[in-house]
Amino acid sequence: MNPLHTTPTFPTLRKLLPEGKQWVSFSIILTIFLTCAIGLSAGAQDQVPENWFNLDFQADGIRGVSTEKTYRTLLNGKKARKVVVAVIDSGVDAEHEDLSDVMWINVDEIPGNRRDDDGNGYVDDLHGWNFIGGPDGKNVHHDTYEITRLYARAKAKWEGVDSDALGGKKRREYEAFLALEAQFEAEKEKAMGEAGMVNNIWSGVQAIREATGTQYPTVEEIGDLEAGENLPAMGLFMIQSILSSGELSFKDLADELEAAASHFSKSEDYGYNTNFEPRTEIVGDDYSDPSQRMYGNNDVEGPDAFHGTHVAGIIAANRNNELGINGVADHVEIMAIRAVPDGDERDKDVANAIRYAVDNGADIINMSFGKAYSWDKDAVDKAVKYAVKNDVLLVHAAGNDAENNDETDNFPNDGYERSGFLGLGSKTAITWMEVGALSWAPQETMIAGFSNYGADQVDVFAPGVDIYSTAPGSEYADASGTSMASPVAAGVAAVLRSYFPKLTAAQVKDIIMRSAEPVTIAVAQPGTGESVPMTQLCQTGGVVNLFRAVEMASQTNGKRKLTKEEKILFGE
């Protein structure tokens, strides 16, 4: 699976199209294009409600998480402590106008002196750390997919081996290699086939521009065109059909097709390229050694920080500066940890990012990334256990493939590969929360069509469609995905840990799940459209709700001991 959130989101096309492993299955695109002409989208969508993820279902008719209502009522005048939320992602713009005041600052580090002042092993880690950078300041931008790395490793071992001479364990390993090879080739072929179809329609856009003599022609101008040698009939028909629905402007369609074409080009050049290896030269670590931790650099923004900046804003964009947006939580410091490239994140980096967050005081870790294969799950599991032991809540996005996580792999996850934890025999991480994506659409269609689900593996749903948040350069933009739902839930958790400091991470998860607003009507299951009860899509059968969670938290006896500073703040 492509990482959740280094691929383009294509927000306007995604109003019509579900999100998929390699951008989206092009057979679905073709179907949508062809059926739009006969009324699939009879009338443009309503405008996305502003700040919808913070709204209240009862008061506003929009199933947000009741953030604003909670601050006006239950939390009005209440004391709160600062909590640290680590954002493990593609990078965060720490200078953003709506984030600069809420960034975590390592007060024991002297900025820019090129020394490890606090002795934590990381030099000048003022706002966090970058595990996919090098000591010379260079950064990994593009990387391969995990299946590519696994296949390349197996290929180097088994290609050309005399299979007839193999037996026992070696024979089984060789057969596993053949299965992996077949899977790799199938995924690559599918992606490249979809790339060809995207490029064909993109060529149609370019041909329309040439025929009309303008960069962004009107629907009427396009409607007057006739197919010819330089303007294929199918491409023209599909473009005319989608534009006539009123869902997209030509500009939006052109911009997103161009981005899609670029994405597929990068899949071919980097993602599925078994000869591409950016890490060795740039990072310079021994990737075969998962215990190695002291590598990287302090550039927490990196070459493309859109995704991480967007996630950070959802959690904690400054609520008091009258700029941009309001994040969910108001007493948060964002610790930026860069570990997700344009390609699949690597398990070693994820494990080290979790450990860095824990060691440097994170209360919550948001992880809006994922993949279908794992290089070293044991290394990640050990880091997750370390976070659980240290009372840290881990919030993870469920994925954007419209698949059942109970039946398909989605890494990382809360299940330990090796059973047993601290002698208790635990098989799962008790402070891990898996989050699916909710839309602002009407009741039956409230579940995002791209969201993964699972009656066992997914805990709750949260807003994740058309979420307006921060973007690099003090800009703002919409994005969709379980990537956006996870930080909404992380923000709610941050509010609870801030205003109710005695609560443990496990208690916070329990409260969020038990207080989830139940969805009592049948909803459309992602991928199939089948009408099912919400309890088939997640454990709670409900949606994260801050108001209900605060009500429950206020009646819960915490187990965590307060620090001296917290006792002073809360008068205990």
Image (cartoon, grey):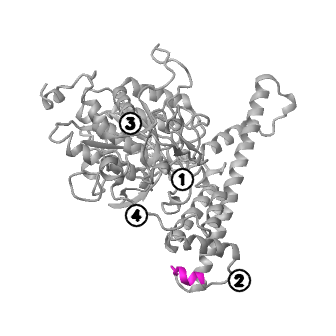
- Number of other residues with Cα within 10 Å of mark 2, as a class: few under 14, some 14 to 19, many 20 or more: few
Q: Which residue is mark 2?
A: 228
Instruction: Please say whether residue 135 is visible from this viewpoint.
Output: no
CA distance separating discs 1 and 2: 39 Å
- Number of other residues with Cα within 10 Å of mark 1, as a class: few under 14, some 14 to 19, many 20 or more: many
User: Residue at 38% of width from left, 35% of height from top?
Assistant: 356
Q: Which residues are magenta?
A: 216-223
Q: Main secondary structure of the magenta part?
A: helix
Q: Which residue is mark 1?
A: 142
CA distance separating discs 3 and 2: 56 Å
Q: Observer-nearest residue: 557 or 100?
A: 557
Task: Residue type at mark 3: give it.
Answer: Ala
**Mark toward the viewer: 3 or 2:** 3
Residue 217 counted in the magenta span = yes
**Mark toward the viewer: 1 or 2:** 2
CA distance separating discs 4 and 1: 35 Å
Disc number at residue 47?
4
User: Is residue 257 placed above or below 292 in the rendered structure?
Assistant: below
CA distance separating discs 4 and 3: 26 Å
Task: Residue type at mark 4: give it.
Answer: Gln
Task: Residue type at mark 1: give it.
Answer: His
Percent position of residue 441, x then y = 45, 54
The tag earlier along the polypeptide, 4 or 1, is 4
The tag earlier along the polypeptide, 1 or 2, is 1
Q: Is residue 347 left or right of residue 493?
A: right
User: Is residue 272 placed above or below 286 in the rendered structure?
Assistant: below
Position of the N terminus, as image quadrant, is top right
Percent position of residue 28, x then y = 64, 57
Q: Assign a secondary structure to mark 2.
A: loop
